[in-house]
Amino acid sequence: MSTSHLWRRAAGRLLAAVLVIWAAATLTFIAMRLLPGDPVAAVAGSIHTPTPEARAAIIEEYGFDRPILAQYLTFLGNTATGDFGDSYSLHQSVRQILADRAWPTFQLTISALVAAWALAIGWIILTAGRSRPVRRIGSGLEMLAISVPQLWLAVGLLLLFSLHLGWFPVSGGDGFEALVLPALAMALPLAGYLGQVTREAFENSLEQPFVLSSAARGTADLAVRLRHVLRHAAIPGVTVSGFALGWLLSGAVIVESVFGRPGLGATLLQGVTTNDVPLTGAIVLIAAIVYVLATLVVDLLYPIIDPRIRRS
């Protein structure tokens, strides 16, 4: 695959990503307008029954009386510059809220993704291509990790390791210790899924001629699995990793609420319960953008991970 072709491929993927983000922004705008409830009452907050004068002032300030097309174009323009307006419930800039609360969620998401890959790789190397009972145990534990509801898992980890054993803090978002249990609660189901999608490719790679020849030359089994097999078997798991970021962000709503972490997940739940349209829409849109960009990066990494794709 020539360099020019790689650049054209990257440009095409980038254009597709921009179109998907535009579609996500459009759907977010439509969903925000279809949400039940009175936006004027949501802005008024503690004023249970706004006076006609207060309603008129809110409508004029937020542009609720403008034509829908004008509102849509303003929304797109503001979104492109990172201006999501003001939160109805917190009465401050949504951009500032996102800046303050994005780091705990980013830290949790990346930690969970790294932990999930570490668990999946270790488990696959230990069980894939072994005897039938060992393979069944490996597959069974992967299925168990996927099947346990994340809420149950988070509550179980909290009860056992925080309340009963006292090894980790019950709530909060400061320090490494406060990150361990939330990251583990998000990582275990993902590790099971990564293990499932990677195991078959890993076992197929174990039967390839280059692996058999390496083993025949006396290369240690662990070295063969790490150096040769894992790289060829990683592509299905890498593909899932792009999709997994969106799943992890949605899972953060549950996990951050259980462990009392001040992140975007808990903020999204607050926005939904208070009918805070700008805050809810901004977080949903940010999650969609992260998902699209992660998928784009994974797609562009294919030729680097597997040279066979680049040569084709």
Image (cartoon, rainbow, N blue to C red):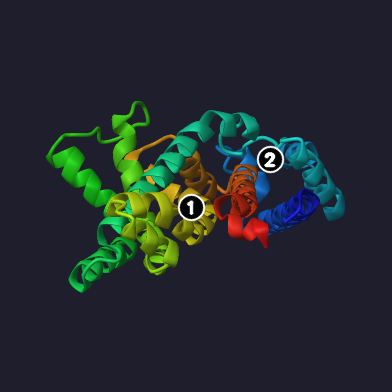
The residue lying at 82 percent from left, 43 percent from top is: 74
Amino acid at circle 2: Thr
Find the residue positioned furthest to the bottom. 132
Q: In this rendering, would 208 be left or right of 185?
A: right
Disc 1 residue type? Ser
Q: Is residue 106 above or below residue 133?
A: above
Q: Secondary structure at mark 2?
A: loop
Question: The C terminus appears in which quarter of the rendering?
Answer: bottom right
Q: In the depicted view, which residue is nearer to us: 144 or 168?
A: 144
Q: Nearer the viewer, mark 1 or mark 2?
A: 1
Query: Percent position (x, y) of residue 266?
Result: 45, 42
Q: CA distance from mark 1 to mark 2?
A: 38 Å
Q: Which residue is mark 1?
A: 250
**Residue at the image point whose x is 78% and y is 45% from the top:** 75
Q: Which is nearer the eye, 265 or 61? A: 265
The answer, for residue 49, to whether it is visible in the render is: no
Residue lying at the far top in this picture: please name it.
175
| Neighbour tally class for label 1: few under 14, some 14-19, many 20 plus, Cα within 10 Å | some
Q: Quadrant of residue 259?
A: top left
Q: Nearer the viewer, residue 121 or 92?
A: 121
**Which disc is residue 15 wearing?**
none
Q: Earlier in the sequence, mark 1 or mark 2?
A: 2
In the displayed image of the protein, which residue is found farthest to the left?
Answer: 165
Q: Which mark is residue 51?
A: 2
Query: Is residue 99 placed above or below 195 in the rendered structure?
Result: above
Q: Residue at x 34, y 60 (%)?
A: 192
Determine if residue 139 is in view: yes
